[in-house]
Each structure stands twice: as structure tokens, then as C-alpha cells.
């Protein structure tokens, strides 16, 4: 890592890539030109991400594949769908967006994922895993039903194949016939090393003698570019497949014609095979390619994570810009707190869905390798697995990003809440997340959890509170519980040597006033305190309370504040229907709004917010101190106008 705000790298020379504005410009390129444009595309990708930061390793691994796909298929009429979309930076460069590639993930710039509104070459938006085959199947079947030309090509990684949705789609894929092509990009690594039976199964396939011989056959096919002989090659492939003791490959059993494995970095192999696949009457077809994440950039190839996600960096050395030293991140605070709980209690176990480092559970794994379960990209299974553990007396913590927990909502309801099982949910990336934008924002968890009977839902206002809440959840065995916390650094408060067990459903008051009450849930507390300072300077005595719990609410505290203040404002980092809605509903039920109390609920706007810096996003959302002050003043002005008009009447 290097210190500094930015790095200046010299732009690489890319003479052939400079002639490519759209994929149609690749159609006339010969083999040597395709190899050259791929090399230049890799250089351009490295240089661009060195300026912006973002996902790098996955894109480096699909440079040749991207060139080959756009050379062979007729995009955008043929629909190219990238699973997750984080590997699509080379695709963006080739599809008319090169001039904006250095705005990736910046305010007003290109998305870090595929996005329908950004380009006709992005037919389906993505950012979550394992959706591509289902979407491609939809395009393919729609074209067939409407008798329209065009294929749908789904590019999906081996890590994403650990999710059940991919198999649900493949199980129905025969309806598309030869209009559907699935490219299995097998780089033997998603974010963490792949886990489970599928990855081992794929490894056995392409390391066995029959498949090595098949690969040689495909190489010969690629060299000779044999069109009419594809039927004979398919017959040989079928014979090879049927020699396996399993009776055929998994993909064949699901109705796919399997081709591969193929070296995904060798355009001399890729292009002829893809051309044959494009023209084949067989279908649907699955092409299994083997690639290397981080390919072609030494520092990425040498790194454990293959530069999956990077800060700005120096192209020559690979050294990333080092952030200024600050407080520990909420993720790291959670991880340490959970390790402490596991040290005290051998019933504490942890579950992650392919995000051990992102959730901090890699630290838990280092301390307790037998008590960390990485289930792969399988949030539904993770939740029900945790429910089973809880039912058998363990104390499971399921650490899942807010946006990814959405994928397992039925399991949360059916397998956890209805059975009142004490599964603990550690919900990272709560609230707005900055450059990753709407697809990764943790906007909805309070809304979708606090509506469920039996749940305890907490939000940490700082790192110390997070420690207390992890401890409280560890000891809470009477039902499910959740704590939400944001991405990024904490506030810098001292961490407790011994965490407290919080009383369920009880908040705390940080300052007392008489006119305005601000009820905060989560890390908007800092802005609530700043707003209180401003209001006090205007002569408006202000109370600030940290409610801690969205469910159950602290009814005693809310009643006292409602009865003794003119204005009551709730603020949260979540969507409509969450904390503020629950407070307002209870106030209404109790008749506490009948005597002139002015209630305002501040929450995220009813839109999917664009990517930007987190601070800028919260300003846009009107969830900062100036917006709180303005809301209070507006409520008082409204009250004053209402009283004046009443007197005139």
C-alpha cells in the first residue's frame, strides 16, 4: 500500500483498441488482430481501474472471452448477460463507453455493474449472483415465441453456480432450444475459494483422462474450424460423457449439450468453438471455459484475492492507495466481538454465504475453524441451516449483507420467525453503501424484519453499541434477533472491555430538552446530535434519544417524549415502512398524536438512489444534520401557521 490521495499513471498505447467504438468494429478482425485488441483491452482495463478503484480481478479473467463473444455474436441483437456484472468492465469499454470508463462508480459516472438504462448492450441489470441463466432463458423463450431472431448468452462463474437459482433455471432451459447459450466461466475462485461438492465435481471433470482427451479433440476442432464435423465431434463427446460412472454429466442430465473444458484465454480455441456453438442446431448449449482470475497483471495474479476489489493503485507496482488511519470498521468490530463471544461460549457458531472476508468472519475462522461454515452463494440454505443449528441448541450467527439477506426472506419468515428459533442475524452494509449503488444498498432490512412477530431488531449507533448488541444477541435465546450496522469506519469511541447485556426494547437518552425530540435509530445519531446543537443555538431545547431497538420499541421512552415535546422527529437509515412507521403507528394507536404533537419521520427517499460517496448520498436523502434542522423548523412553522389560522377563524 502507498500513502496519497491519488496516483498518476501514464496511459498505455492502444492503437488497435482505439479503432473500436462498438462491437461491430471487431467483426472484420483476424486472429492476430483479436489477440492484439485483447492485450490492449487488458492494459486499458488495468489503467482505468487504477484511477477509479473497483473490481479488477474478474474483468482481467474474461478479457479474451469478452472479445470473442462480441466478435462472434451479433450484440446487441444477441443478448449478452453477465452474471453479477462486476466482470463487465471490458464489455463496457467495447460497447461505446470507453470515454467514460474512468468515471466508474463515481457520482454521475458509469455503474460498477451492468445496467439497462446505461446501454443497449446491457440487456439485463445485475449485481447479485446467479440470475443470468434465468434472465437469458426469458430472453430466449420470448424470441422463440415471437419468432424473432437472436440468441441469449449467459456468462456465469463457477462460484455463482453454487446458488440453487442457477440450477432452477437450467432445469427449465430446454424450452429455449438452441437460442440459449450458457458460458460457465470456471476460474476456480469466486470471492473466496469455492466450496462444496460442485467445485470438486468440476475439478474432477477437467482433470480426468477422458475429458483431457476431449479437450484435445476440441483443440483440433478449433484449429481446423470444422463446421460440418460438429455432429461427429458431438457424437464423440457424448460417448466420452457416457463412460462416467455417474451415467453422464450434471449438465447433460439437465438437458444441456456440453462443450469443454476450453482454455478461456486462447482466442484460437475460443473463437472457432463459439462460432460452431452460434451456428449449432443443438441446444441449449453449455460451454465450459477455464480462466484465471487476475490474468495478465502480475500483482493481481500473485494476490490471494486476485485483486477482486481494489482501491486506486500504482500500475507499475500494484501498490494500492492506503487510506488514512482511522477508527476500526464496523465489520472488524463485529468480528472481534463475535470471536470474544465464541471464546466464552462453545455453542456460538458463524455462517457466511461466500463472504468470509467481507463480513469479517475470516477472523472468526482463524480462531475457530471448525465453527465457521461458508455455505457458498446460498443465502436461503444459510438461513435454514442456522435455524437447524438453533433448534439443536447452538447459538448461530448468520452474517449476511443486508442486500443479500433479501434473497432468503421466505426462510427468515418460515424457518426462523414462525418457529421462533434463536437465529442471530448480523446484517452488514446496512444503509447506503456508496459506490456500489442501489443494488447493494441496505435499505429494506428494518422494514422486512420488524414487521415479523417474534423478532428483536437492533441498530448500532457506534462501535461500542455494536459490541453490546452482539453480546445481547448471544445471550438472547427466546427468539430470533438481528443487529444492523453500516459499511466503513466507526466513530472512534472506546470499545468496552466487558460488553453489556442490553435490556430488550429499551433505548437511551443522550441529552434532555423540552421542545424538540429527535429519536434516532442507528448511525444517524451523530447528525442528530449536531442538529440538536444547531436547534439549541436557535433557542429550541432539544432531546436526543438513541432508540437502539426498532422492535420491540421502547414505549415508555416514546410516550414520555411525545407527552413533553412539541415536535418529535424520527430518523433512520432505511426505507419507508421501517422504524419511523412503527413509531408513528404506535403513537396513533395510543392517541398521542391527538393533542397537537407534530411528528415527522425521516427515512430514505422512495427511490433507488444512484451511486455516490456515502456522505453525499445521505445529504441527497436529506438524512443529515441540516435536513433535520430544516424539518423541525418547518414543523414549527406549520404549527404556528395552523394556530394563527385557527385564531382568525
Image (cartoon, helix red, strand yellow):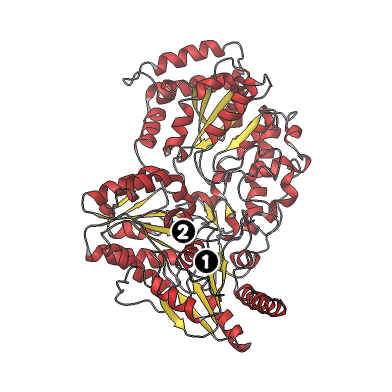
Q: Where in the figure is residue 532, as x and y percent of width and height?
A: 56, 82
Task: Categorize mark 2 by other alpha carbons within 10 Å: few (<14), some (14-19), many (20+).
Answer: many
Q: Which residue is mark 2?
A: 446
In the visual, does 313 lie left or right of 256?
right
Q: Nearer the viewer, residue 477 or 148?
A: 477
Compared with 233, 470 (above or below) is below
Q: Nearer the viewer, residue 285 or 185?
A: 285
Q: Where in the figure is residue 499, as x and y percent of width and height?
A: 31, 74
In the visual, does 387 lie left or right of 85?
left
Residue at mark 2 to residue at mark 1: CA–CA distance: 9 Å
Q: Earlier in the sequence, mark 2 or mark 1?
A: 2
Q: Secondary structure at mark 2?
A: helix
Q: Where in the figure is residue 296, as x and y percent of width and height?
A: 57, 45
Q: Where in the figure is residue 285, as x and y percent of width and height?
A: 53, 23
Compared with 496, 64 (above or below) is above
Identify the residue at image location x=47%, y=34%: 166
Q: Nearer the viewer, residue 157 or 526?
A: 526
Q: Which mark is residue 572?
A: 1
Q: Is residue 271 visible?
A: no
Q: Residue 367's quadrant in the figure?
A: bottom left
Report if the CB atoms under discs 2 and 1 are less than 8 Å apart.
Answer: yes
Q: Which mark is residue 523?
A: none
In the visual, does 373 lie left or right of 157?
left
Compared with 193, 585 (above or below) is below
Task: Categorize mark 1 by other alpha carbons within 10 Å: few (<14), some (14-19), many (20+).
Answer: many
Compared with 343, 153 (above or below) is above
Amino acid at each position: 500500500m502507498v500513502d496519497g490521495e491519488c496516483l498518476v499513471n501514464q496511459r498505455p498505447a492502444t492503437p488497435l483498441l482505439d479503432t473500436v467504438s462498438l462491437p461491430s468494429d471487431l467483426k472484420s478482425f483476424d486472429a492476430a488482430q483479436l489477440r492484439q485488441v485483447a492485450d490492449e483491452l487488458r492494459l486499458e482495463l488495468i489503467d482505468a481501474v487504477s484511477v477509479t478503484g473497483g473490481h479488477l480481478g474478474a474483468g482481467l479473467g474474461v478479457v479474451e472471452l469478452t472479445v470473442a463473444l462480441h466478435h462472434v455474436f451479433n450484440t446487441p441483437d444477441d443478448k449478452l448477460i453477465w452474471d453479477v456484472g462486476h466482470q463487465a468492465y471490458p464489455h463496457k469499454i467495447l460497447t461505446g463507453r470507453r470515454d467514460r470508463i474512468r468515471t466508474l462508480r463515481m457520482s454521475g459516472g458509469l455503474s460498477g455493474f451492468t445496467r439497462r438504462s446505461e446501454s443497449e448492450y446491457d440487456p439485463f441489470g445485475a449485481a447479485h449472483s446467479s440470475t443470468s441463466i434465468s434472465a437469458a432463458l426469458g430472453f430466449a423463450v420470448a424470441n422463440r415465441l415471437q419468432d424473432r431472431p437472436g440468441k441469449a448468452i449467459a456468462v456465469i462463474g463457477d462460484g455463482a453456480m453454487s446458488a440453487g437459482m442457477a440450477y432452477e433455471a437450467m432445469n427449465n432451459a430446454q424450452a429455449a432450444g438452441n437460442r440459449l447459450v450458457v458460458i460457465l466461466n470456471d476460474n476456480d475462485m469466486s470471492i473466496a475459494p469455492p466450496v462444496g461438492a460442485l467445485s470438486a465435481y468440476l475439478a474432477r471433470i477437467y482433470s480426468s483422462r477422458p475429458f483431457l482427451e476431449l479437450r484435445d479433440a476440441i483443440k483440433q476442432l478449433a484449429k481446423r474450424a470444422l463446421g460440418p464435423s460438429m455432429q461427429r465431434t458431438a457424437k464423440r463427446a457424448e460417448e466420452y460423457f457416457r463412460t462416467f460412472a455417474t451415467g453422464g454429466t450434471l449438465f447433460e442430465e439437465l438437458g444441456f449439450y456440453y462443450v469443454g473444458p476450453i482454455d478461456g484465454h486462447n482466442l484460437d480455441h475460443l473463437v472457432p468453438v463459439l462460432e460452431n456453438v452460434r451456428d449449432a442446431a443443438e441446444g441449449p448449449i453449455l460451454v465450459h471455459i477455464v480462466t484465471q482470475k487476475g490474468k495478465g497483471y502480475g500483482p493481481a495474479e500473485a494476490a490471494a484475492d486476485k485483486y477482486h476489489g481494489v482501491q486506486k493503485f500504482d500500475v507499475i507496482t500494484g501498490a494500492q492507495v492506503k487510506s488514512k488511519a482511522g477508527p476500526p470498521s464496523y465489520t472488524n468490530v463485529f468480528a472481534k466481538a463475535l470471536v470474544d463471544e465464541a471464546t466464552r461460549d462453545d455453542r456460538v457458531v458463524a455462517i457466511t454465504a461466500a463472504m468470509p472476508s467481507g463480513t469479517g468472519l475470516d477472523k472468526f475462522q482463524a480462531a475457530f475453524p471448525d465453527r465457521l461454515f461458508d455455505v457458498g452463494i446460498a443465502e436461503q440454505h444459510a438461513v435454514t441451516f442456522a435455524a437447524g443449528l438453533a433448534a439443536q441448541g447452538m447459538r448461530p450467527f448468520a452474517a449476511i449483507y443486508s442486500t443479500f439477506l433479501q434473497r432468503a426472506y421466505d426462510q427468515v419468515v418460515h424457518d426462523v420467525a414462525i418457529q421462533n428459533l434463536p437465529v442471530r442475524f448480523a446484517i452488514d452494509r446496512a444503509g447506503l453503501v456508496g459506490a456500489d449503488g442501489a443494488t447493494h444498498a441496505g435499505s429494506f432490512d428494518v422494514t422486512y424484519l420488524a414487521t415479523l412477530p417474534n423478532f428483536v431488531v437492533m441498530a448500532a449507533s457506534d462501535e461500542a453499541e455494536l459490541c453490546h448488541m452482539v453480546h445481547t444477541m448471544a445471550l438472547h435465546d427466546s427468539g430470533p434477533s438481528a443487529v444492523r450496522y453500516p459499511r466503513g469506519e466507526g466513530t472512534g469511541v472506546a470499545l468496552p472491555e466487558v460488553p453489556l447485556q442490553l435490556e430488550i426494547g429499551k433505548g437511551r437518552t443522550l441529552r434532555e430538552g423540552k421542545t424538540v425530540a429527535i429519536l434516532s435509530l442507528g448511525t444517524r445519531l451523530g447528525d442528530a446530535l449536531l442538529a440538536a446543537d444547531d436547534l439549541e443555538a436557535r433557542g429550541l431545547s432539544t432531546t436526543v434519544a438513541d432508540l437502539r431497538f426498532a422492535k420491540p420499541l421502547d414505549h415508555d421512552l416514546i410516550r414520555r417524549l411525545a407527552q413533553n415535546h412539541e415536535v418529535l422527529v424520527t430518523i433512520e437509515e432505511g426505507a419507508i415502512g421501517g422504524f419511523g412507521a412503527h413509531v408513528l403507528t404506535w403513537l396513533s394507536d395510543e392517541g398521542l398524536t391527538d393533542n397537537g404533537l407534530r411528528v415527522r419521520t425521516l427515512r430514505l427517499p422512495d427511490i433507488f438512489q444512484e451511486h455516490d460517496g456515502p456522505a453525499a448520498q445521505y445529504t441527497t436523502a436529506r438524512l443529515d444534520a441540516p435536513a433535520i434542522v430544516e424539518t423541525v423548523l418547518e414543523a414549527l412553522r406549520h404549527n404556528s401557521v395552523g394556530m394563527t389560522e385557527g385564531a382568525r377563524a
